[in-house]
Image: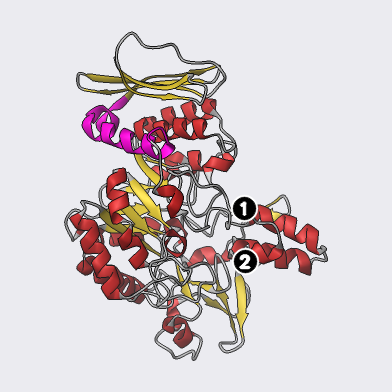
Amino acid sequence: MFYEIYVPSFCDGNGDGIGDLKGVISKIPYLRQLGISGIWLTPFYPSPKADNGYDISDYRDVDPDYGTLEDFDMLLHRAHEAGIRVIIDMVLNHTSHLHPWFRESRSSARSPYRDYYLWEKEIPNNWESFFDGSAWTYDESAGLYYYHAFSREQVCLNWSSGQVWRECRDILRFWLDRGVDGFRLDVINFLKTDRAALKMDNPVENGGTRHVYDKNQKGIYEAVGKISEAVHAYPHKYLLGEIGEEDLYLIKSYVGPGLLDSAFQFNLGSMEKLDIAYMADQMRKMEAEGVYPTLFFSSHDMRRHFNRLCGLDTGKAKLLAMFLLTARGIPFLYQGEEIPLEDVPVERPEDLKDVQGRYGYEKKRREGADEEAAFLYARERARDYSRGMVDWQRAEAQEENSLHSVYRRLLEIRKRLPSLTLGTYGEIRQQDGLLYYQRIWEQERVGVYLQFGEEALEAPDQDALFEVRDERGKLKGLLVCE
């Protein structure tokens, strides 16, 4: 299981109120005791933090808020000593507007960095950014428009440039040489690999545009292939990609020999409410695609599933933990879900720290909305809810029947039973709140019963491998050999 660490809010190691690498180091024993085998670190590079570090101004250092390169090396050493692999977020789609490449690019038409980004004399299409308004912003210094798929401070790289690729390859090698175990590639299917696509308008729908020509462009698989070749030149490395899609067939196209090892599937993570019929359907579809999927319900980009899917019901959170660790796929757990943490409140405009929420608020105010209406609009778009500091006093005071204990014990079982990591599905069915499925590997057959409704499960005839009961003692989750 991978554990996502959102560095700014995971653990404060020096008392300044901000999470940092020393804080991560201090919690490696906790992660080992939980049973975690890999961690994913969100960006820790120098950044003006317009988008919480996903706007990088230096790819070869650590932001002073988070520590030093020496701290990072120590983190790698301690994690590897504990048997924990470390993958790091890598943002190759865009840089910060304060990155030296962009400063040079905008300085002169003759700059060798001019071609690192997408510059146009006039706005060439109707593409919109994912945060607000046009994806094209005029730069006074250059006298040209530059392209940004996200915020104005996140300037998209021109992947049609061979020099951009060589720069990115060298960045990957820098971190591989330090000993990282792989990368999580941020929004990798958004790389701009086809300048001809700039002539194409996206279709207009429901008062906005649908993102068609600004992603999955011609040449994207060649670019991902080059990244894969560079990373896999180092043995035993893992390459994970964030593909901003829900189409499982399209996601599958990025995974395989010479491409990504895995890609995030958002089909379960993007559920707005618990829907076991949908879960069962997606389980069948993911296996039919023939790719070993990723499984997650929460991340730094979405509200915590303890609020969103469980309604603050710890019993349901335990059942989702059982699903995450027994369904077919690579499980990813977001920091604090094992405690479980709740969303932090976003109750007034000052609580909007995330760029998506801030942009939404500013947009509505420009359109004439009053403060309340603008805030209500922005609050729905904000990603601040899941980014609060982890409560370590709660995390380290867990009782034996806690959610934390469920994760720990299931991870122990998962490591013992090949069917839970290598197995296929047998029967999958759902009815009246019950989700049942089998995992099969050679002669080993395991059955998983998850009762999300009001009824209790019947006690099994054979000894259970694992069970979950609610606060009234009702049997709600069951793992048995069949």
Q: Nearer the viewer, residue 234 or 53?
A: 53
Q: Residue at x 51, y 86 (%)?
A: 106
Q: Tell me: 216 left or right of 126.
A: left
Residue furthest left as drawn: 235
Q: Nearer the viewer, residue 288 or 312?
A: 312
Residue 407: image x %, image y %? 37, 37
Can residue 203 be seen? Answer: no
Q: Residue at x 49, y 51 (%)?
A: 244
Q: Give yes or no for residue 307 being in the magenta stretch.
A: no
Q: Give yes or no for residue 419 being in the magenta stretch.
A: yes
- Residue carrying label 1: 210
**Neighbours of disc 1 within 10 Å: few (<14), some (14-19), many (20+):** some
Residue 101: image x %, image y %? 42, 82
Q: Tell which circle, 2 or 1, labels the residue nearer the N-terminal end.
A: 2
Quadrant containing the C terminus is top left
Can residue 164 be seen? Answer: yes
- Residue carrying label 2: 125
Residue 149: image x %, image y %? 55, 65
The span shown in magenta is 400-424
Seen in the picture, residue 144 relative to 45 is either above or below; the reply is: below
Residue 158: image x %, image y %? 44, 71
Helix, strand, or loop for circle 2?
loop
Seen in the picture, residue 410 relative to 388 is either above or below; the reply is: above
Q: How many numbered dots are placed on residues in this image? A: 2
Mark drawn on residue 263: none
Seen in the picture, residue 110 relative to 390 is either above or below; the reply is: below
